[in-house]
């Protein structure tokens, strides 16, 4: 069992720069991210872990279906229909594989996530 009440604040490692990822387009600021996989890795069908990112704005096309819960911070996400959704600690949301949204991180955000990539 993964107890995220205990794991949510544990150590994270630097991840590849957002500007190097083919499914991300940074549009404002210089957001830096880090994370940890507790199940799987970047090439796995199933990934579970913790992710954190500093303020900035970027377009993100989801490489898999993802459900996540914010542990800290605040974000505004603009979906493909142009609707803006504001999330903060304790909020959970789901995005579908292939969906493109815009993340505006207002305050450094940390989330726990589960990603399922049905194409792997």
Image (cartoon, rainbow, N blue to C red):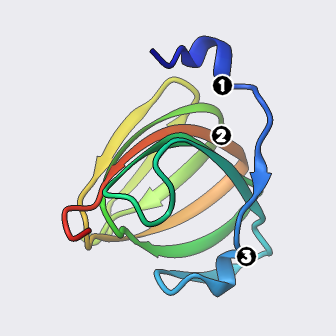
Distance from disc 2 to disc 3, alpha carbons, whole Å, reads: 17 Å
- Looking at the image, is mark 1 or mark 2 earlier in the sequence? 1
Above or below, 53 against 62 in this view is above
Look at 78% across and 51% down and name the residue there: 13
Position of 2 compared to 32: left or right? Answer: left
Horizontal and vertical percent for residue 78? 41, 64
Position of 33 compared to 23: left or right? Answer: right
> Marks 2 and 1: in contact by CB < 8 Å?
yes
**Closest to the observer: 36 or 101?**
36
Look at 59% across and 62% down and name the residue there: 104
Distance from disc 3 to disc 1, alpha carbons, whole Å, reads: 22 Å
Horizontal and vertical percent for residue 89? 58, 28
**How would you rate the neighbour count of disc 3 (Cα within 10 Å): few for under 14, some for 14-19, many for 20 or more?**
few
From the image, which quarter does the N terminus lie in? top left
Horizontal and vertical percent for residue 28? 70, 79
**What residue is disc 2 on?**
110
Look at 26% across and 73% down and name the residue there: 98
From the image, which quarter does the C terminus lie in? bottom left
**How would you rate the neighbour count of disc 1 (Cα within 10 Å): few for under 14, some for 14-19, many for 20 or more?**
some
**What residue is disc 1 on?**
8
In this view, the mark in front (1 or 2)? 1
**Closest to the observer: 104 or 93?**
93
**What residue is disc 3 on?**
17
**Closest to the observer: 2 or 61?**
2
């Amino acid at each position: 069992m993964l107890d995220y009440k205990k794991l949510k604040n544990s150590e994270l490692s630097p991840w590849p720069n957002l500007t190097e990822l083919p499914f991300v387009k940074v549009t404002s600021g210089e957001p830096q991210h880090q994370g940890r996989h507790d199940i799987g890795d970047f090439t796995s069908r199933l990934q579970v872990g913790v992710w954190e990112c500093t303020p900035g704005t970027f377009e993100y096309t989801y490489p898999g279906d993802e459900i996540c819960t914010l542990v800290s911070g605040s974000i505004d996400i603009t979906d493909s229909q142009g609707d803006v959704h504001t999330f903060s600690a304790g909020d959970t949301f789901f995005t579908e594989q292939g969906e493109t949204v815009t993340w505006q991180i207002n305050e450094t955000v940390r989330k726990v996530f589960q990603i399922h990539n049905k194409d792997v």
